[in-house]
Amino acid sequence: MELLTCKPRWATARNPDLETDGALLERVANVMGFSLYAWQRLVADTALEKMDGYYYFRTVGVGVGRQSGKSKLVETRIALELLKPRRTVAYTAQDRNMAKLKWQILVLDRVDVLGVETRGDFLSWTESLASAGVQSILFATLKGPANLEGIQCLWLENGELK
């Protein structure tokens, strides 16, 4: 189902002279297991415009109907920012319980330092988290691409996703 078949009534025009992280956000969405709707990509391309290495817009407002993908767009943006070094992300909702429902992700860095004897327990733990609806992003330094059952492994080499 396509949610953008016409131009929005009100929107800031994309400045083609500025870089954007819109395509990078789309790649993060793909890694998370979904594709952005056209309206989400339009928002991402404009909202993530950069000038001199910094985001051009400090505040972005989005108004679409219920169940249209606003939370997915926010989740993807949070994941994008958490993948960058030295970032802190804050997320608010109506109350703490609503915030926990909207965003349940675990990001672990340097899981490769776990001892061989504890890796099996660790993978079992992440599988139990996944069955409870918690998404995990694990970062590790490996000698080559991994093939782990039930875990989508991505190989980065020289900054390129392979």
Image: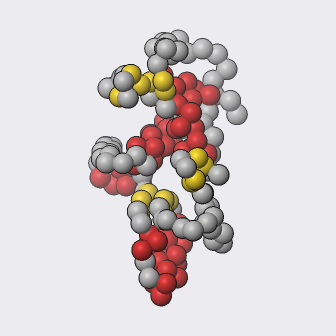
Residue at image position (57%, 54%) is 156
| 35 on left or right of 17 | right
Coloured how?
Answer: secondary structure
Residue 22 vs residue 94, the one in the foreground = 22
- Above or below, 134 relative to 31: below
Residue at image position (47%, 77%) is 122
Image location (x, y in percent) of residue 110: 42, 66
Q: How many marks?
A: 0
Quadrant including the N terminus: top right
| 21 on left or right of 97 | right
Residue 150 in view of the camera: no
Residue reaching furthest to the bottom? 117
Residue at image position (57%, 29%) is 41
| 150 on left or right of 115 | right
Residue 150 vs residue 24, the one in the foreground = 24
Image location (x, y in percent) of residue 62: 44, 26
Residue at image position (61%, 66%) is 144
- Above or below, 19 relative to 130: above
Image location (x, y in percent) of residue 152: 62, 61
Image location (x, y in percent) of residue 134: 47, 62
| 1 on left or right of 75 | right
- Above or below, 160 relative to 104: above
Residue 94 vs residue 70, the one in the foreground = 70
Residue reaching furthest to the right? 1
